[in-house]
Image (cartoon, grey):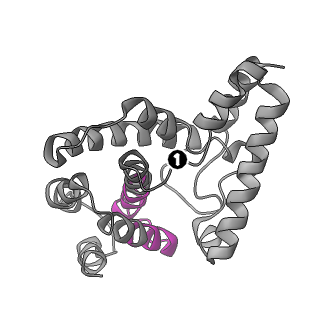
Amino acid sequence: MGIHTYFRSLNELERIFRCPGKFKFEVHTVAAHSWKVVQYAKTLADIEEKHGGVVIDWKKLYEITSSHDYGEIFIGDIKTPVKHSSPELRVLIQQVEEGMVNHFIEEHIPEEFKGIFHNQLREGKDDSIEGLILEVADKMDQVYEAFSELQKGNSEREFVVMYRNALVKIKNINLKCVEYFLEQILPDMVNEETISSVDIKRITEEALAL
């Protein structure tokens, strides 16, 4: 019981694999994804402060990025096409996930820390600067994961869709760090050598034109 139970539960994130059921050259866990999202987010936040003239709430940023997928301990990583097949289903999945996280907190976390855990393990994507940066960072990892598979010659359609949809989502978020990513970082990625039969440059151009 207690916070020890929370610490032990983190091991489960290392056993949950992303994009289940699809052939992958590189297997990624939810734990690895969460770590990368934190890295993307802190760099994006630095860019946003430098180019956007904003002040980042760094404590909030680290809390929501490092814990944004904790609820997958209870429901696993649901395939993206399923999760986003309808707005209603996405809301229901989120409600189930949040309900199970809240139940875990109420059952295992000491009373004096319950408020802190409810705040830290909540859904962090919102209209705040930090919430938007989390959204961008989360989608960036989808871009990088899908790109890596396509680059190595994996022609599974799901990775093409994942790459395209994540780029579209990113480009429609109004942040200076998004402009920087699209203008300075993405071209370096697309111009890397690839053995893919998929025309990644064309897919990228189509996504950015939407």
Q: Residue at x 46, y 68 (%)?
A: 162
Q: Residue at x 23, y 43 (%)?
A: 54
Disc 1: which residue: 124
Asked if residue 34 lies left or right of residue 97, the reply is left
Q: Residue at x 76, y 56 (%)?
A: 96
Asked if residue 17 lies left or right of residue 40, the reply is right
Q: Nearer the viewer, residue 182 or 203?
A: 182
Mark 1: amino acid: Gly
Q: Is residue 78 above or below residue 30?
A: below
* Secondary structure state at the residue bearing disc 1: loop
Q: Verify whether residue 143 appears in magenta.
A: yes
Q: Nearer the viewer, residue 21 or 32?
A: 32
Residue 208 lies in what quarter of the image? bottom left
Q: Nearer the viewer, residue 146 or 171?
A: 171
Image quarter where the C terminus lies is: bottom left
Asked if residue 117 lies left or right of residue 162, the reply is right
Residue 157, position as x, y percentages in the image: 49, 75
Residue 91 lies in what quarter of the image? bottom right
Q: Is residue 73 above or below residue 183?
A: above
Residue 177, position as x, y percentages in the image: 23, 51
Residue 207, position as x, y percentages in the image: 31, 76
Q: Nearer the viewer, residue 43 or 32?
A: 43
Residue 108, position as x, y percentages in the image: 81, 26
Asked if residue 144 lies left or right of residue 64, the reply is left
Residue 53 lies in what quarter of the image? top left
Q: Magenta region, mostly helix, strand or loop?
A: helix
Q: Verify whether residue 142 appears in magenta.
A: yes
Image quarter where the N terminus lies is: top right
Query: From which residue to which does the magenta span run?
Result: 141-164
Q: Residue at x 71, y 62 (%)?
A: 93
